[in-house]
Image (cartoon, rainbow, N blue to C red):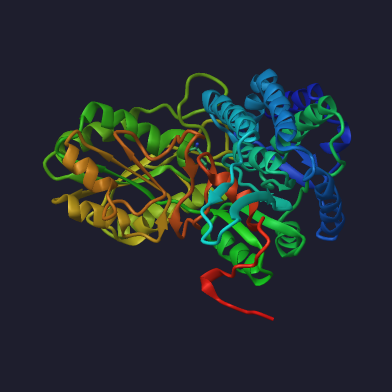
């Protein structure tokens, strides 16, 4: 099995025209979580390389910012075409490298295609503003210019889609990009970069250094974060990582876009459609083996429906298929590595200690000792205590009972993270309270669906320890440009604002 995966991976990479040197003989070992064994080794960059990489990106920026935005959009259109043509290959590679079930691997590539389409349209917009001036014969406007070099630090769980959210927008906005992918997922990054290079070859005259990949660990990421020539650092990962990045980027007055931890909750009200709720909770909590930042981690169930819904949910947890993401029809694949499995077990132990009743959570032997598959865990908790307030990046759903909607909303908001949330209700008043200013405090608040699986058209991101960044749709593009206010006097006199006089 292991060798089969390694052989398939190198076949896929070779098919994309990635030279042997990229994945043989390097010093960064890549393991497939499907079997846990090494499937490739990739050369790693060093912190010292970052200086040159950034210098190239900066030179490229001086040319790229002058290319008209719709023409920049053409490059992203070509990237979208390459992604469409290679969706199966790249989706498969996502499954092999990070263990997503086949449909989710493909879904990840679809998300990339969608953001490319969105960015192409955007490349003919990037609208500024006309503002009424208080002075005669004056025009006041606001326009958006390219910001500079964008560093993109991505995580293993969406190893390529989150890059695409950032890259597609940054490229149409006139920025140049440097990608530091997760050390756990360098192969999908190389594959994606190869597709971008094909798009660049078809595009023609793009500046050298427009888009680069930097392989490496913390030091490489740190050098990118600290480099004052990197205008924007967009980082996805843990809150711990984000706190470090935010402070370092702020110290040099750079800009950061942060997508950090989520501890997402859903509220099930007495008016909920319970059949729909059951299906939505299953996908939200167990999809991607609980390894989305939008994964449903806390479920508040009204006391009047608790005994109807929760036993049914426990049955789903007992029977859901856990297994290889590429063979059979398993819905839950492996955890990324041993550390992740151990963190899950630690959280379950802490939950028991805090009075929780744990259903599931045990290790499932699918492909031997080096891979880590676990039955998702549903934990009935007496309250929001112990590990419930932390994000554990594994399939654990904490279930709590509530009496009033106000209590449920207070529980929902009572954690440090603020990414995504949802309510299951058919009562308009409950829905609107949840969506009101006094309702969910998250960046995403859904109705009659789980907190995960966002479309690219909306702005994606969250508040509090989630970091406050917004990526993907809506006007998130503004985060990748710099705003300039222009006051233009087309008269012959010089009226001053606020009626100030200054006659010399
Ligand atoms: C992430 O887990 O880092 O909304 C991103 C979702 C996906 C993206 C998740 N569209 O679940």
User: Is 219 in front, or is 341?
Assistant: 219
Q: Is residue 346 above or below residue 39?
A: below
In this image, 364 relative to 7: left or right?
left
Q: Quadrant of residue 174?
A: top right
Residue 34 position within the rendered picture, expressed as x and y whole percent measured from the top left: 60, 33
The answer to whether residue 235 is seen in the rendering is no
The percent position of residue 57, horizontal first and vertical second, equals: 82, 50
104 vs 342: above or below: above
Q: Nearer the viewer, residue 120 or 395?
A: 120
Along the horizontal axis of the image, is 217 left or right of 276? right
- Left or right: residue 124 compared with residue 409: right
Residue occupying the point 64% across, 25% down? 92
* Left or right of 437, for residue 141: right
Tell me which residue sits at (63%, 31%) in the image: 116
Front in this rendered view, residue 166 or 307: 166
Q: Residue at x 26, y 55 (%)?
A: 438
Position of residue 365 relative to residue 42, above or below, is above
Residue in the image at 39% along x and 36% along y: 284
Frontmost residue, 60 versus 289: 60
As drawn, which residue projects farthest toward the front? 492
Picture quadrant of residue 471: top right
User: Where is residue 478 drawn, in percent x and y?
Assistant: 58, 48
Whether residue 259 appears in this view of the structure is yes
For the N terminus, the image quarter is top right
């Amino acid at each position: 099995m292991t060798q089969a995966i390694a052989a398939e991976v190198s076949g896929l990479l070779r098919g994309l025209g990635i030279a042997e040197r990229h994945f043989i003989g390097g010093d960064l070992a890549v393991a497939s979580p499907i079997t846990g064994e090494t499937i490739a080794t990739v050369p790693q960059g060093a912190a010292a390389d970052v200086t040159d990489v950034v210098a190239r990106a900066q030179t490229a920026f001086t040319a790229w910012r002058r290319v008209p935005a719709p023409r920049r959009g053409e490059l992203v259109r070509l990237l979208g075409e390459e992604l469409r043509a290679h969706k199966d290959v790249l989706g498969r590679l996502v499954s092999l490298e990070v263990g997503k079930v086949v449909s989710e691997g493909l879904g990840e590539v679809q998300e990339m295609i969608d953001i490319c389409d969105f960015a192409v349209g955007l490349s003919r917009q990037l609208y500024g503003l006309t503002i009424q001036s208080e002075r005669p014969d004056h025009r006041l406007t606001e326009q958006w210019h390219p910001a500079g070099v964008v560093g993109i630090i991505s995580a293993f769980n969406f190893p390529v889609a989150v890059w695409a959210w950032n890259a597609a927008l940054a490229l149409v906005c006139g920025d140049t990009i440097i990608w530091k992918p997760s050390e756990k997922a360098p192969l999908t990054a190389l594959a994606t970069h190869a597709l971008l290079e094909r798009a660049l070859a078809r595009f023609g005259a793009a500046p050298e250094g427009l888009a680069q990949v930097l392989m490496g660990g913390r030091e490489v990421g740190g050098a990118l974060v600290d480099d004052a020539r990197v205008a924007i650092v967009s980082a996805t990962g843990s809150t711990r990582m984000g706190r470090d990045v935010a402070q370092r980027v702020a110290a040099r007055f750079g800009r950061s876009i942060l997508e950090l931890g989520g501890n997402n909750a859903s509220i099930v009200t007495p008016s909920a459609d319970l059949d729909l709720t059951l299906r939505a909770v299953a996908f939200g909590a167990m999809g991607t083996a609980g390894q989305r930042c939008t994964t449903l981690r806390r479920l508040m169930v009204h006391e009047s429906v608790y005994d109807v819904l929760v036993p049914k949910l426990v049955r789903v947890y007992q029977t859901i298929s856990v297994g290889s993401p590429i063979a059979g029809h398993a819905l839950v694949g492996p955890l990324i590595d041993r550390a992740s499995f151990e963190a899950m077990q630690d959280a379950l132990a802490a939950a028991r200690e805090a009075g929780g009743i744990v259903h599931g959570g045990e290790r499932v032997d699918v492909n031997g000792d080096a891979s880590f598959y676990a039955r998702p865990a549903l934990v009935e908790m007496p309250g929001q205590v112990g590990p419930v307030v932390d994000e554990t990046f594994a399939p654990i759903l904490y279930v709590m009972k509530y009496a009033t909607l106000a209590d449920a909303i207070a529980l929902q908001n009572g954690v440090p993270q603020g990414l995504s949330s949802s309510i299951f209700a058919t009562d308009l008043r409950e829905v609107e309270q949840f969506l009101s200013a006094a309702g969910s405090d998250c960046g995403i608040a859904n109705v009659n669906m789980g907190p995960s699986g966002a479309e690219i058209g909306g702005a994606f991101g969250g508040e509090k320890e989630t970091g406050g960044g917004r990526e993907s749709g809506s006007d998130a593009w503004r985060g990748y440009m710099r705003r300039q206010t222009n006051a233009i006097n087309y008269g012959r006199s010089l009226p001053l604002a606020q009626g100030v006089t200054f006659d010399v």
